Image: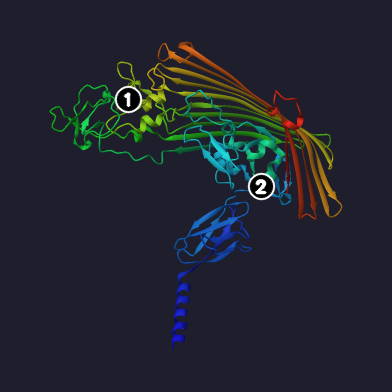
Amino acid sequence: MKKLLLVFAMFLFGAGAILAQRTVSGTVTDENGEPLIGASVLVKETTTGTVTDIDGQFTVDVPEGATTLVVSYTGYSTEEVALGASNVIDITLKEGVTLETAVVTALGIQRDEKAIGYAVQQVNGDDISSANTVSVLDALSGKAAGVQITQASGAAGAASRIVLRGQTSFNGNNEALMVIDGVRIDNSENHSERSLGGVAVSNRAMDINPDEIESVTVLKGAAATALYGVDGARGVIVITTKKGKKGTGVSVDYSTDYTISEVSLLPRFQNKYVQGVSGTWLGPETGWPLSWGPLADTLFWDGSDYDYDKNGRIVGASDPSAQTPFTPYDPAHDFFQRGTMWSHNLALSGGGDNATYRFSFGRTDQSGIVPKNEFERTNLGLSSTADFFDNRLHATTSINYINSGGRRIQQGSNISGLGLGLYRTPISFDNGNGLDDPEDDPSSYYLPNGRQRNYRGGGGYDNPYWVVANNPFRDEVNRIIGTMRLAYDFSPWATLSTTIGTDFYSDVRKQVYEIFSRSYPTGTIIDDEWNYRQVDAYLNLSGGGDLGEDFSLGYNLGGNLFQYNEKNLYTQGDGLNFPGFTELANTTSITTINTIDRQKTLSLFGSVDLGFRNFLYLTLTGRNDWISTLIVPTKDFNASDIGVFYPSAS
């Protein structure tokens, strides 16, 4: 009898488990409606899953409590699909990270994916441009595994950091090396040590137009980056730009994007007590910093003539002068605005049997969520390819001009920074003085006597509208990136090529602190100019082919000369003679600092790829860098003292 009851109970438990789950079916297709064969369909947070059949169809048993399916397919972005009441779901996957037969590896070498002994992630240009971001680095976010993209701030034109291999240095640069069309480019932010800081400047990756990118390859492991030597230790981002196509007529492409940004979350502020102490209101003229005054819902404005508020002074309900019930201000909410980004891109391209061309123009205008925070960028590009001597000689050239910059906002943790003055403003003080456009009307941040109007009577922190109007940081970058490559095919076993790339830019900055600014009460003007020159030149001999029926061999031997020269002229003028005239000639004392940083690196490198029956591969690479900054002036020169060797095998 006991055995019979036990069997019956087990039957009921099993039946309950079966009834608790459900069966979901559907079809997985691409954006063109074509079925994806072998796509993975997994019930999230379980080991239950299946793959699609030849028609892209699937059927999966979903356990009780499961709410999401995770659908993935090689070369497409992974989708998480919420389960609703229906048991039939059709899913469309978008193209994402592409793992095609040929991938771009170190030094721009194209190789068969299956012949590579390390992971390579490649993102196509459509996914970059469709992200609708100002920065190409922000467009990479979420599109490649292990890529850490961190924005410096939400300000217009602010830099983004890209880290591929973690923190490889305690106090040095951990960002990935950036390579465009086979040559390195600079991605510095540039900071002068004497400046007050607190401004979210651009790094030079911001100069790249995302709409002009054909593909981005992410190289992370030591084997993948060894051919870049010391600079590749942090990982490498290899960018290939768009070119014209052979055998096509004239093609005109135009695109425009418009995006809106708003503050998503603000800190919680107390809204019960006004400025003061022990239940007594103390006005801004007292300089009192805290908000422990009377309860806001017991107060009135008296309507008197008062420089700090158009509604008058604050009084209690029993005061005979009480006129209008007091309404708390919301300083943070009232300050921020809607940000916008508008970009336009125009390209003219084409090609014949032996040559191609592409001309491109791009314009981006971005306004931040902070008033007067702006960033603009103009891109002009011209590229061409040509083949000569029965397609044995190949020439590729490209030149890009970039003008970028804008108006930045001082937002650091200092008394002239935006945040301290804004977030500490009491609910009884209106930073904008009741004006519709306070950032453009001096009566919001100036008192009639010419001193600063803020909630501390001119002391404490700068009024936020004073910060955006009177403490501007302006910058302008003019940059030229050029590349030229010549290659001659002697035979499949021998191609001789040379590539030279240049990266020249000037970055001119001006930071102003008007008279009565809290950080510099007498006024200060900072002119900060950076000039950068870089040359990256390669000479390569490469080739390859089959060694009999079973073996194949490929090789690449070469040398590289890389040098840069960076100059910084920092000039600070203190003590303005007259307000409103923001030139160094208007200051009483001037300090100038001139710094120069330069380096040369001479390198020899090589790689050998051995294949067996198209399934077993061995790749050996090595690079030796001789770096000028390792020279010790007090020692006799020895080349081995400044040389660093980087081997790899995969």
- For this rendering, which residue is in front, 535 or 173? 173
- For this rendering, which residue is in front, 417 or 334? 417
- For this rendering, which residue is in front, 249 or 543? 543
Label for residue 454?
1
**Residue 510 image point, x, y percent:** 50, 21
Q: Amino acid at mark 1?
A: Asn
| Res 581 seen here | no
**Residue 112 image point, x, y percent:** 73, 48
513 lies left or right of 274: right
Q: Are marks 1 and 2 in contact (CB under 8 Å)?
A: no
- For this rendering, which residue is in front, 91 or 263? 263
247 lies left or right of 521: right
Under tag 1, what secondary structure? loop
**Residue 593 image point, x, y percent:** 55, 18
Name the residue located 41 percent from the left edge and 35 percent from the top edge.
338
Vertical arrangement, residue 602 with respect to residue 568, above or below: below
Vertical arrangement, residue 566 with respect to residue 93, above or below: above
Which residue is the site of mark 2? 120
